[in-house]
Image (cartoon, grey):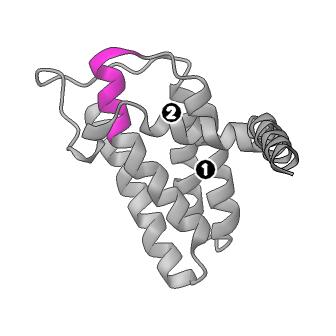
Amino acid sequence: MKKTILLGMSVMLFWSCNNTGKTTPSEETEVQTENHATHQHAESADAVELDNGEKWLVNEEMKPFVLKGEELVSTYIKDNQTDFKALAEQLKDQNTQLIKSCTMTGKSHDELHKWLHPHLEIVKTLENETDATKANEVVAQLQHSYKEYHEYFQ
């Protein structure tokens, strides 16, 4: 009887270990996005700093995704759009592409993440918002976030 129980528990243990690594592509992207946004960034709560008074350089392959996100927010505001859920989805897509294209390293990378982590949180807030008035406040926060990006990065 003890051997049967021990064998059953062993099979369950091996089976459960075998299944933990299986994820869908969307789960992998989400985990990758979250990991990239938070890895090695305990300092992300700190304010972004300039590079000895100069703006940090952002890799060329990353810039289009920031600029497109900023354009989406500007157009949303300018055209008095109301589908904030669609905006959130579009921004999420731009942020995913930004993260996938990241090849930066060192201090400039760390400083970019000091901007990016709060920015991702604002997009997440917009995505989860249900009230249109509050959503407009969040959109204003996004507009400010992009202005802050331009203060520290080029």
- 137 vs 98, left or right, is left
Element on which disc 1 rests: helix
x and y, in percent, of residue 27 in the image? 73, 44
In this picture, residue 41 sits left or right of residue 136: left
Residue 126 position (above or below residue 101): below
Q: Is residue 5 magenta?
A: no
Tag 2 secondary structure: helix
123 or 31: nearer the viewer: 31
Total marks placed: 2
| Residue occupied by mark 2 | 36
Three-letter amino acid code of the residue under disc 2: His
User: In the rendered view, would you say 89 is above or below 52?
Assistant: below
Q: Main secondary structure of the magenta part?
A: helix
Q: Gap between marks 1 and 2, in whole Å?
A: 17 Å
Spot occupied by residue 128 in the image (x, y as percentages of width and height): 59, 70
**Mark 1 or mark 2, earlier in chain:** 2
- Local packing at callout 1 (Cα closer than 10 Å; few below 14, some 14-19, many 20+) is many
Q: Which residues are magenta?
A: 105-114
Quick check: marks 1 and 2 in contact, CB under 8 Å?
no
- Residue pointed to by mark 1: 91
Residue plotted at (35% across, 41% down): 115
Q: In terms of image quadrants, where is residue 19?
A: top right
Q: Residue furthest front?
A: 1
